[in-house]
Every structure is written in C-alpha cells, then in structure tokens.
Amino acid sequence: MIKIIRSVALFIFLNSALASALEVSTDYFKTDPGTAIQFHVTDDSSTYGHFDDVLWAVSQQCTGQPDFIYVLNGQKLSTSIGGRLHSVEGAKVLTMFFAGVPTSNQGNFLKFFSLPNTFTDGDTWTGGWSCTCQVNLVGSVQVNGTSFDNCIDITYQATGSDYTLGTGHFILAKGIGLVQIRFVRTIDNSTVQFDHISHGTAASHTLAGRIFLNDRPFAGKVVQIHNRGYGIRSVTDGTGGFSLNAYGPEIVLRIGADQNGDDTLDFSGSWPRTYPLHNVAGDVYTIINFYEFMFTETPKGAQLNTGDTLTLQADFEGTEGTTVMQWTKNGEALPGETERVSCVRMRKKTTLAHIGFL
C-alpha cells in the first residue's frame, strides 16, 4: 500500500512538472472586451506609400462566432478582425485571427497573428493565411522606451500578394498582449512597424444619434462597428435615431442596408458608409447627414462650350442652419440657380459636383 501511494505521488509530481513547462496562449494574447493597446504604426514603403498614425487596438464584445473581435482604428485607418480561441489547424489548436470585417492596408499585419493554445519554446506551426510560424521565449524586451518582461517572439513567413509577402515578428508580453509587430516586405524591403505606446482597459460607451440622407431621416438602416454585426448593431427608427454600445476611444460607425438579413452590410454603390468617432471619452450623441445627388441635366439656361467647367458647391451656414447650393460656370455664379435647403451637418464649403466639358 505504501509503495502504491508513493507511485501515485511520483506520477502526480511528474505530470505537474510537465504541465508547468507549457505556456498558455491566453496568458499572452488578451481577448477580454475592453482590452486596449495603443500603437504608433509606421510604413516606409516607397511602393505603397508612407503611413504614420497612432492606432488603438481594442477588443469588442461579440456574440456567436467569432470568439473575439478587435478593432484597429485611428485617424487614417479602420479595421475589424475576428478570431477564434480554439481553431484546429492541422496538428495544432490555435488562438488566431481568421476574418477581416473589413481588413485594410496595415491592418493586414495584425490579422496574421496566431499562437497554439499551449506551447513551448521553439514550437512551429502553420497559421491562418498559410503563414509558417515559430515561437520563442525571449525574456525582457524593450519597445519604445518601455521594458517588458516574460516576452515571446513569434516569427512568421507570409504568402499572398506583394503587399503582404515577407517576414514578420509579433512580440507579446505576458499579461499585457501585443507590444510590437514588425513586418518586412519582400518586394521593396520596406518595414511596417507597430510599437506599443500604452495599454489598459477601455470603457464601454453608448453611441447614439440621428442619421439623415439629403436632410431627411434615414430610417430602417443598419448602424454597426464592423461589416458584420456580431451582436453590436442598431436599426434606425423613423426619426433616423440609433443607439449601440462599443469600447473606445477610436470607433468607426458603419452604416448601410442589410436587405437579406444575414447580419452583413450590403455593398452597393457608395454604401456602406463610415463615420469615425475620435477620442471618445464618454457617451456620444451625434448628428450625421449624408448627401447623395443624381444629376440628369445641367442647369437650365447654361450655354456650355468646349473647355467649360460646371461646379455645384454647398456653402454651410451654421449648425442646424441652411446650405446655399450654387452652380458656377468657370468660377462664375449662374443666375437663378441658387437653392437653399435645410442642413444638419456639412463641411464649410463642399463641392458636390465638378463637371468638365471636353
């Protein structure tokens, strides 16, 4: 009996030691709603154009699939990427991004992230988008003047278009999440880099308001923060009113129709449209006015010759005021063609049409 007890104790000890040698993906990659990391993002590509912006990666509440979803928003970029906590990929079960809703430009380099649910130093795998990956325990890493302990470095080779063909690194700090992304393109040796600025927990805010199209309430339209709803959506009422909740501080509203009810915005013409909300620090109430004009004929009485240019300009006159609509020919106002219409929100002088005659 004593020998049996000792054998069981030894078996438990050995298995406990083995378990402690395994790292867990969610200790490094945080998916709790409100998890927020601020990055300075640069891209020095001469082929695709330089990029420099401060972006917030914020985990949002979601229902159903995916298991988690991040938005990556700033002044110049808006991206949403959904992920799974336990995605079976070959011999590995991965925590990984799998769907861009939508993914744009530098946001593509976040979506390549994947990490086995449990792993040890030197593990390799094939992640999403056919990326070949390896993880190494690297200890302390300094990023943007801040030192992070207990870090891992995921290196990966990405395939696909020239824009995303190359070699990348994800640096994650235990208990914090991503602190650096670095990607070098094969086509021009350019570098895309995400450097940690700050991190914390973002608050959930109510985003509400009214939406108008050509100064009329835009009723029965969908408002959400991704191209798919994933539980965060509002349908405008008869006054154009909407209300939903999301984690800040950088949020992009996506507005359009969902005719077939599949939880996805319909893409048609210039729709869906986006409306950014910057530096959100509390609940927001906003008035949004979109304009959509169709011109079937030129202004009555206008004599047009080769080289003439017609312009329709809207000149905003104050909040909740009016807008003067003015046709001009070659910079000179056309008499009798001025119209005043109610306006809720518009930039000071907005060109609505610019027509040249060859």
Image: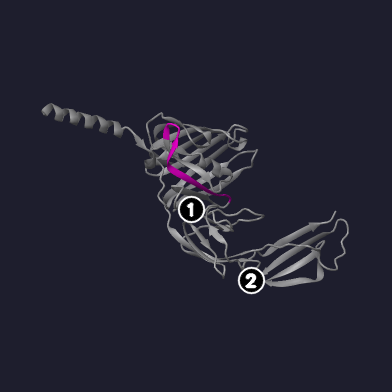
- How packed mark 1 is, by other alpha carbons closer than 10 Å (few <14, some 14-19, many 20 or more), is many
x and y, in percent, of residue 33 in the image: 42, 52
Quarter of the image for residue 266 reads bottom right
Nearer the camera: disc 2 or disc 1: 1
Q: Contact, CB < 8 Å: mark 2 with mark 1?
A: no
x and y, in percent, of residue 290 in the image: 63, 63
- Residue 323 lies, with reference to residue 203, above or below; the image says below
Give left or right: position of 114 versus 14. Answer: right
* Residue bearing the label numbered 2: 318
Structural distance between the alpha carbons of marks 2 and 1: 38 Å
Most distant residue in the front direction: 260
Q: Earlier in the sequence, mark 2 or mark 1?
A: 1
Q: Secondary structure at mark 2?
A: loop
Quarter of the image for residue 274 reads bottom right
Give left or right: position of 334 versus 281. Answer: right
Give left or right: position of 52 versus 175. Answer: right
Quadrant containing the N terminus is: top left
Most distant residue in the left direction: 1
- Residue 8 lies, with reference to residue 244, above or below; the image says above
The boundaries of the magenta stretch are 76-92
* Residue type of the residue flagged with mark 2: Gly
Q: On residue 230, which mark appears?
A: 1
- Magenta stretch, main secondary structure, is strand
x and y, in percent, of residue 139 in the image: 38, 34
* Residue type of the residue flagged with mark 1: Tyr
Number of marks: 2
Q: Is residue 56 visible?
A: no
Q: On residue 190, which mark appears?
A: none
x and y, in percent, of residue 106 in the image: 56, 43
The colour scheme is one colour
At x 30% / y 34%, what residue is drawn?
Answer: 19
Q: Is residue 68 visible?
A: yes
